[in-house]
Amino acid sequence: MTTASITTEKTEALRLTERINRIEPSATMAVVAEADKLRSQGIDVVDFGAGEPHFATPQHIKDAAIAAIQGNFTKYTAVAGTAELRDAIAHRHNVDFDSDYRREEVIASTGGKHALFNAIQVLVDHGDEVILPVPYWVSFKDIVRYAGGNCVLLESDESQGFRVTAEMVAQLITPRTKVIILNSPSNPSGAVMSAEDMTEVIRLAHQRGIWVLSDECYVYLNYAGKNFSVGALREYKERFVVLGSLSKTYAMTGWRLGYAMAPSAVVSAMAKLQSQSTSNPTSIVQKAAVAALKGPQECVEHMRREYIELRNHVVAGLRAIPGVRCTLPEGAFYAYPNISSFLGRGGLKSASDVAGRLLREAHVATVPGEGFGTSEHIRVSYATSKAELDRGLERMRKFFAAL
């Protein structure tokens, strides 16, 4: 056998599916990996990249997990989660947002991203259009594309704080629109949709037979007013899916526990898909999640208050850097500064160039805006201490001043 024929056989053997080639690796995970690589070399990196709380998981939640292990709660559970957990998810949401969900309308998953993935796979088919506001969380577009759907991008206005209105959504609806994705508070911009606009989008979608996926991972981190979930709109609940996570609310990112609340037929379809992929969420984590949802909630408000202080601190620091513009985020724990004034300087051609050199030269990890659908921004996570924010901001100031 010749070398050429061996090479051809290897190429054929490595041919991957068309659907996996539609998507790209997560931009945030790529930054985390690169920052970890530098740290392994002994380099001190200030991490503004990872989207996770800097708080420790509250003790009563950790205690529940330890008790689950000691009590040998380590077997398989129902695919959609234990009855205890699904009831706890529904109860917490019903109390906090005046929703009306029952156990059969709830599914627990291995993180909020998993719930989102499952929901899109059962609702979006080849050729379906999905309205997606920009900037968007990095995984939305790729998960839609993996399902064969087409994203119709809704461009928001930075001068208006990246807010999305019902009128903006309505203008993009076509006969092929199957799903509208809402994310409020938003990752990466921190923008918050008004309750009135969210209500109007839900009403419009219900009227036209369109699904709404409402990603509410940051719903408890709303700094603009009263927390609002579309789940409160009980009369329209057969046309939307509420997606949530314990990761941000209870500082449980590594625990991987998310959920969806939807009509029972959708939940059943998601459970069918989940049964052939991950099966149930980790049994031990489910016990911890019940403790989080049914236990004291003071920790949630404590974290929210501190995030507001950190937000004000980081935005003031970013605005103090000549050439950087930054809107005031109204929720979540990210700032999304505009660094367009530096493009064209020092060989910088894109936000990816800026983020790459900030990491390699200033040792500050940020996420480039291209992963979120914009080309003139970087995402800065302020879920860290003020001292760490100051260290990173000073490094950024010196980096940009040298250009």
Image (cartoon, grey):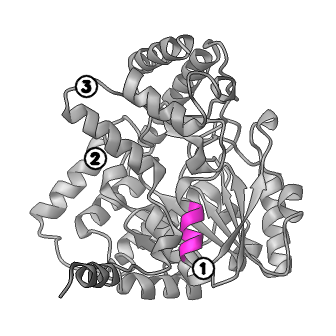
Picture mark count: 3
Is 39 inside the magenta-drawn segment? no
Q: As displayed, is residue 287 above or below residue 303?
A: below
Picture quarter with the N terminus: bottom left
Instruction: Mark 1 and mark 2 in contact? Answer it, CB < 8 Å.
Output: no
Residue hosting label 1: 148
Q: Position of residue 343 (x, y in %)?
A: 64, 28
Residue 284: % across, % down:
23, 64
Find the magenta span and give its range.
140-146
- Looking at marks 1 and 2 on the same chain, the residue that comes earlier in the sequence is marked by 2
Magenta segment's dominant SS is: helix
Q: Is residue 131 left or right of residue 255?
A: right
Q: Nearer the viewer, residue 206 or 96?
A: 206
What's under tag 3, amino acid-wise?
Ile
Residue shown at 21% from the left, 78% from the top: 3
Magenta stretch holds residue 141: yes
Question: To which residue does mark 3 refer?
Answer: 43
Whether residue 97 is visible, yes or no, is: yes
Q: Residues within 10 Å of mark 2 (few under 14, many from 20)?
A: some
Real-space Cα separation, disc 3 to disc 2, in angstroms: 35 Å
Q: Residues within 10 Å of mark 1 (few under 14, many from 20)?
A: some
Q: At 59% across and 46% down in the image, what residue appears?
A: 370
